[in-house]
Image (cartoon, rainbow, N blue to C red):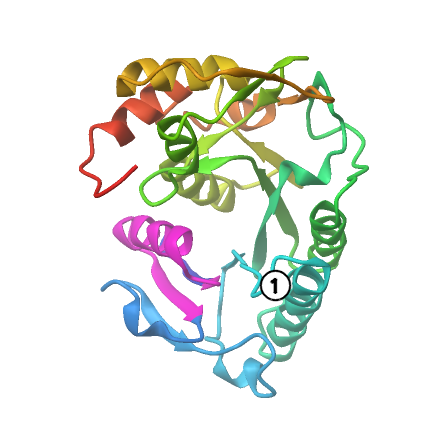
Amino acid sequence: MAQRILIAGCGRLGSRLGLELAAAGHQVTGLRRNPEGLPAGIAPCRADLFDADLAARLPTGLDRVYAILTPDRYDDEGYRETFVAGLERLCQALRASGNASSRLIFVSSTGVYGQDDGGWVDESSATEPTRFSGRRLLEAEAVAATHPGGAVIVRFAGIYGPGREALLRRVARGAPCQADPPRYTNRIHEADCAGVLAHVGALATPAPVYIGVDDAPCTQCEIMDWLAAEMGRPAPPREPGTAGGRRCSNRRLQADGYRLRYPDYRSGYRSLLAEPRSTV
């Protein structure tokens, strides 16, 4: 059945998600300050989360609302303002506009975990972030949980894809990888981010929290060695470190029926490397 869907913070990922939802027959509105760049198929909503008349600008009869927020500043105050205060304003506006019964899907991060010993974490693991970004996102998750229509939290890690090529640039410039102790990393292709969000939004009874990662957490040196070989570059030099990162499990997401388009870094990065790019 077609639904009325709002994507608040309809940037690169939101636009990709919006096009996928529109292709499935849903009516999609993208909220952003400057909506002129939205692709055809996504109805524009020009608004800022701190507009006094935000509620009046929102569509009515919404079934789903995605909050895919990006801070203006990457410091503690920037995260507090966007993720905590901004989400509070969105939730208030949803209630005031008659959209309290809509399902809210909030995009968070595995940065809410503090484990750094190379072990596994899942949705039941303790959330004790050591960085301000993780602490603010955890506060925002608590805000989302107060939404009357119910909330789903999706914690992504290491999003990559077209325009998200930081690791390729690291390998290209010969940056080192951490080998002692080995540092574990997690990632997910942007196409799967959109797929995950569409999937959990449509579930009849979703879990309250999902980790969004692929099937293959690995060490930093493993993936950088593989990329160097694929790119015809020297293997990265090794350097010591102090922490081992963590390995994130996607078993809950898999159990609830999602099948990854790019299940590991090899399939995802091969696709990315095959695309034309001006620079790496």
Numbered-mark total: 1
| Residue 4 position by quadrant | bottom left
Of the pair 96 and 251, the residue shown nearer to us: 251
User: Which image quarter is the C terminus in?
Assistant: top left
* Residue 115 to residue 87: above or below: above
Residue type highlighted by circle 1 = Ser
Of the pair 151 and 131, the residue shown nearer to us: 131
Of the pair 93 and 131, the residue shown nearer to us: 131
Q: Residue at 76% across / 33% down in the picture? A: 114
Q: Residue at 41% across / 55% down in the picture? A: 14
Q: Position of residue 191 (x, y in %)?
A: 36, 38
Helix, strand or loop at label 1? It is loop
Q: Is residue 148 magenta?
A: no
* Residue 182 to residue 173: above or below: above
Res 82 visible = yes
Q: Residue at 38% across / 50% down in the picture? A: 17
Q: Is residue 24 magenta?
A: yes
Q: Position of residue 23 (x, y in %)?
A: 26, 50
Instruction: Please indicate whether residue 200 sits to the left or right of residue 259 in the image.
Output: right
Instruction: Please indicate whether residue 163 sits to the left or right of residue 139 in the image.
Output: left
| Residue 269 position by quadrant | top left
Q: Position of residue 206 (x, y in %)?
A: 59, 39
Q: Position of residue 78 (x, y in %)?
A: 66, 64
Label 1 sits on residue: 101
Which residue is situated farthest in the left direction here?
Answer: 276
| Residue 184 position by quadrant | top right
Within-10-Å neighbours for mark 1: few <14, some 14–19, many 20+: some
Of the pair 64 and 245, the residue shown nearer to us: 245
Res 263 visible = no
User: Magenta residues?
Assistant: 7-31
